[in-house]
Image: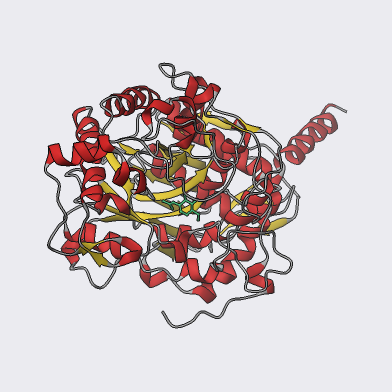
Amino acid sequence: MKSSFSLLVASLLLVSCSDNRPLAEASFDVIPCPQTVEPTADGGQYIIDKNTVIHYSPETPDMERNAHFLQEYAQDILGYEIPVKAGLGDGGINLQLLSGDEASEAYELTTSATAVKLTATAPAGIFYGIQTLRKALPLQQDVRVSLPAVHISDAPRFGYRGAHLDCCRHFWPLDSVKTYIDMLALHNINRFHWHLTDDQGWRIEIKKYPGLTEIGSRRSGTMIEKQWGSNDSIPVEGFYTQEEAREIVRYAAERYIEVIPEIEMPGHMQGALAAYPQLGCTGGPYDVLTQWGISDDVLCMGNPDVVPFCKDILDEVLDIFPSRLIHIGGDECPKVRWEKCPKCQAKIKELGLTKDTEKHYSGWEGYVQYTPEQKLQSWFTRQIDEYLTQKGRQAIGWDEILEGGVSENAVVMSWRGIDGGIEAARLGHDVVMVPTSYFYLDYCQRKDTSHEPLSIGGYVPIEKVYSFNPLPEALTPDEQQHIIGVQANVWTEYIASFNHVQYMLLPRAAALAEVQWSQPEHRDYAAFRQRLDHMVELYQLYGWRVSMQYVEEPAVLDEP
Ligand code: TNX
């Protein structure tokens, strides 16, 4: 009797330790493609089953959080919980922080019959290794998972891997911004460029100037589709309190994403002018714009209160955002008011600004002689640049900041093609490449737009995003060192729902991720296309909207 009882206990124990669920295969054909994935000699694959534990070491908050991210991803994908334990183990999944370069984003991942070993010298590297594991898992619930025996050694190609979101033309609540950050994290993106101020809405609380949000964050309506002069009369409002912005900074940092705030100056400022009309050349009154496009009304350069106003705003911004780079806009600043404004003209005289005799790069217009007004903008930007430098930060601006002479320390974001980036790199400035024709994700994905949501126009299918070469051949290898990375922008004039944001981002973000992360020798659209199916299924698992252009209307690209 006794022995049959112990037999029963023993067999019950056995049942509880063995896991008879079906076995599904993982695949390391993930996006972005890692640097090297080599099969290991012993051929022993690792099986994730109910005995698997996630171990982590050392017991730092970052590593504990990383372990829980992996647990959460596995739960989402496989439908069961893998326990997490502090301290390394002999077997199971081990997340191990090694001593070494704490700024490195590299990781190594080795699987064997008894263990999965993920090592890095910084928690960020562990996080990217976890993303790779996550994307390798089969999208099947309640299965054991067989991980192929491999050694992966991986690191990003570029240090700046960005994505931008315009929260001014349409306002996105905090939860949507967090989901956006979740989407970036899945793509190993590490910079979130948060476009917070514009003509159509000021979206960040500045305590010294409450009018910026009390008045500047509200517009009375929005033009209907592309009918200029129309107004749907539906009020649009919303802003982030400083506390909420800090919450986003924290949320992003936990995912190894730095938030780079953008405060536009001296143009795209009509939201601010609506509240503080004395800072414009005409004195107003100004409304928060209800139309898209570029306002002629910009900050008055002859008004001595303008630079202190901008510095005060930046003081509060710096307090919220710890990023080294602070985006100060600088784009699309018409000069028509300055040309007529007595105060601006007096300033030009005082500064002795004259039209240049030489020709310089000037965006869409090619090479032109800089005007005194362009130099006036440059005089303004220089002061802001110096101020940020004094505070231990660095200004980044759109490529218009080159016009009239770029200030000493600024980083240039090249959006009007890559020429601004080339020019800036030659001048010794760091550059982020964001050319419209590859990375403006507000542009349409299909040629046949009959079933597409209304968009600003353009044509940027996923194949085009994928085809970008970030290092122009026109630059010498030394100059190429100044290209610190690549970014995509999501401007939201014609994007009024967060589902639509997702649709514009996905799956083009997958192509972006390979441009940013993967080595050029691995860039092969056909192979990427194979990897993409799994990625899209993962998007769908999370309930994110995806464009099917890549299946339904594959693009044939013209020769570059
Ligand atoms: C240009 S990119 C702009 C934005 C618009 C965008 C629309 C840039 C620096 N300025 O204000 O939203 O085009 O694609």
In the rendered view, does 361 fall on the left or right side of 61? left
Q: In this picture, is 455 found above or below 75?
A: below
Q: Is residue 507 above or below residue 311?
A: below
* 64 vs 338, nearest the viewer: 338
Callout count: 0
Image coordinates of residue 18 in percent, x first then y, are: 71, 44
| The image quarter in which residue 371 lies | bottom left
Rendered image quadrant of residue 559 = bottom left
Residue name at image x 12 percent, y 62 percent: 357
Task: Answer yes or no: is residue 367 visible.
Answer: yes
Which colouring convention does the figure follow?
Answer: secondary structure
| Location of the C terminus (image quadrant) | bottom left
Residue 1 lies left or right of residue 251; in this view the side is right
Residue 120 screen position, x and y as percent: 36, 44
Residue 304, image x, y percentages: 25, 26
The N terminus sits in image quarter: top right
Q: Residue at x 46, y 65 (%)?
A: 438
Task: Give the percent coordinates (x, y) of residue 421.
Answer: 28, 60
Is 409 placed left or right of 69 in the picture?
left
In this orientation, which residue lies closer to the viewer: 76 or 159?
159
Q: Is residue 418 visible?
A: no
Q: Residue furthest right?
A: 1
**Residue displayed at 29% across by 69% down:** 472
